[in-house]
Image (cartoon, rainbow, N blue to C red):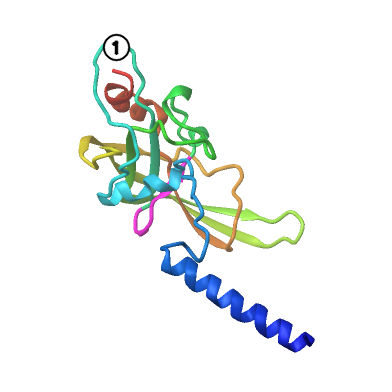
Amino acid sequence: MSAKMRIATLAVAGSFLLLAVVACGGEVTPTVELTERPLMSFDFEDVCRRGTVEKAPAYELEAGSGKIHPLVAFRRDPGDDSFYHMSPSFLELPVPWMVDTGEDHGVVELVVCIDGIDSSLADDCAYEDDEGGEEYMLHIYHTTYQVTVYEAKTGEEVGSTTVEATFDECPMLHMFSDQEEDSYAYPPAGPLEEFLQQYVEP
């Protein structure tokens, strides 16, 4: 038998085998079992736009139990469209309250949305680059934030308040991306912690 005839015979035999597998209900392509990834901070951002995170644990308030209901927080400056994640180091809340960036957020029960609803100019801060001598301008703003707490799993509102954030003076340092930028005061840790205590660690 020539080499061409052997190849043709093998091709025909392979076709019959494929047809037999399909006819018997077999799978032509192997199935791959996908593993679920852990929840991360960005999975919760949509809750600030009244979304839900179905895989999040249920929030059940147990006053006096000492149980902590972990949160993840997002902030939006006045005039911005998007919320961005706030890490524990920025908010300075008690360590057990927040899951740190990059960790599994599968324990998060609450989403805190810190939404800038008003602002007023506090000062215009001029800076100069030590090396090149270029001048930079930072406009700093006192800011009013609407702080709303939602259940992550259901998207239901748990509570809300307003918090005033102010600048006392121009920041000593600022990392510029442009020569002229705006900066909004961060919500103070004290009033924020006092408000959240009743929901996170009642």
The amino acid type found where label 1 is placed reads: Ser
For label 1, the SS is loop
- As drawn, the residue found furthest toward the front would be 1
Report the quarter where the C terminus lies: top left
The span picked out in magenta is 78-86
Nearer-the-camera pick, 147 or 28: 28
Viewed as shown, does residue 134 lie left or right of 36?
Answer: right
Residue highlighted by disc 1? 65
Mark 1, Cα crowd under 10 Å, few <14 / some 14-19 / many 20+, is: few
Where on the picture, by quarter, is residue 105? top left
- Residue at 33% x, 13% y is 66
Viewed as shown, does residue 118 lie left or right of 100?
Answer: left
Is residue 81 inside the magenta stretch?
Answer: yes
Is residue 198 inside the magenta stretch?
Answer: no
Whole-percent x, y for residue 64 in the image = 26, 11
Q: Is 190 drawn above or below residue 17 in the view shown?
A: above
- Residue at 78% x, 85% y is 3
Where on the picture, by quarter, is residue 163? top left
Report the quarter where the N terminus lies: bottom right
- Magenta span: predominant SS is loop
Whole-percent x, y for residue 50 in the image = 25, 49
